[in-house]
Image: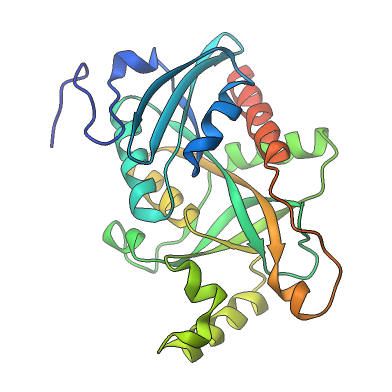
Amino acid sequence: MKQKPEEKRYHINLCKTDLEGAEIAILPGDPGRVPKIASLLEHAKPLAQNREYNSWLGYLEGRPVAVVSTGIGGPSAAIAIEELSQLGVTTMIRVGTCGGMQMDVKAGDLVVVNAAVRMEGLSREYLPIEFPAVSDFTVTSALREEALAQGLPFHIGVAQCKDSFYGQHDPGSMPVGEMLKEKWQAWIQGGALCSEMETAALFTVSAVRKIRAGAVMLCVWNQEREAAGLPQEEEHDTEKAIRVAIGAVARLLKA
């Protein structure tokens, strides 16, 4: 479905003029997180609100930066990525939350995702399952450098992506529960750091659309640590992840 630059995209309700030439977008899942992120930019202003897509625009290093929510899961994320790409955005950074899988990934830690397990359905409509979902090296390096500069606890590695939140948290209630449990243990043995729902879509769609993509996540909880009786405190404040993403965008703009 081809559209003229001045036409609003169907889902995010934005046109090219709205973005004022922005080539970088920060993508939280939660629409409510968008104003919080935008407040760290200069001259921030709201653009549009439609369904799960809340968008703001601000400036960093004198350049426009978009902040657009994607909602939950791969299908809605892919729509935002596609439509932002049509409007000229070429770099996207997801800022979200995840659940830890390795024992050393504690609640409150950050995870910089460099690849994703494609255990969801969206990415299979773009590329065969054998194609890896990987981040852009330059974007991931900027996120790593910023996390180091801020002295924050973080990990770099693989995220497991799924479509069903309750398939992870209540697999025993599912008719395919044994299969879900078996695969969960396989991902852990393979070194997957965390579980979430959007990065596989982001990395796969970005590969097809020639977009640079990265992701930084806050670990909210680790069910493996809980099962092992290890101490942890649930963490929902995404401030650290947001500041790392903003800092990484500044580094990319300076570069």
Location of residue 52 in the rendering, given as x and y in whole percent from the top left corner:
38, 41
Location of residue 141 in the rendering, given as x and y in whole percent from the top left corner:
66, 39
Which residue is found at the position 38% from the left and 17% from the top?
A: 19
Q: Is residue 209 above or below residue 41?
A: below
Image quarter of residue 148: top right
Q: Is residue 113 above or below residue 189?
A: above
Here the colouring is rainbow
Image quarter of residue 33: top right
Q: Quadrant of the C terminus?
A: top right
Which residue is found at the position 26% from the left and 36% from the top?
A: 11
Residue 136 versus residue 39: which sits nearer the camera? 39
Q: Quadrant of the N terminus?
A: top left
Location of residue 122 in the rendering, given as x and y in whole percent from the top left corner:
33, 59
Location of residue 77 in the rendering, given as x and y in whole percent from the top left corner:
39, 47
Which residue is found at the position 82% from the left and 48% from the top?
A: 153
Which residue is found at the position 44% from the left and 23% from the top?
A: 23
Total count of labels: 0
Q: Is residue 92 left or right of residue 100?
A: left
Q: Is residue 175 above or below residue 195?
A: below
Image quarter of residue 191: bottom right
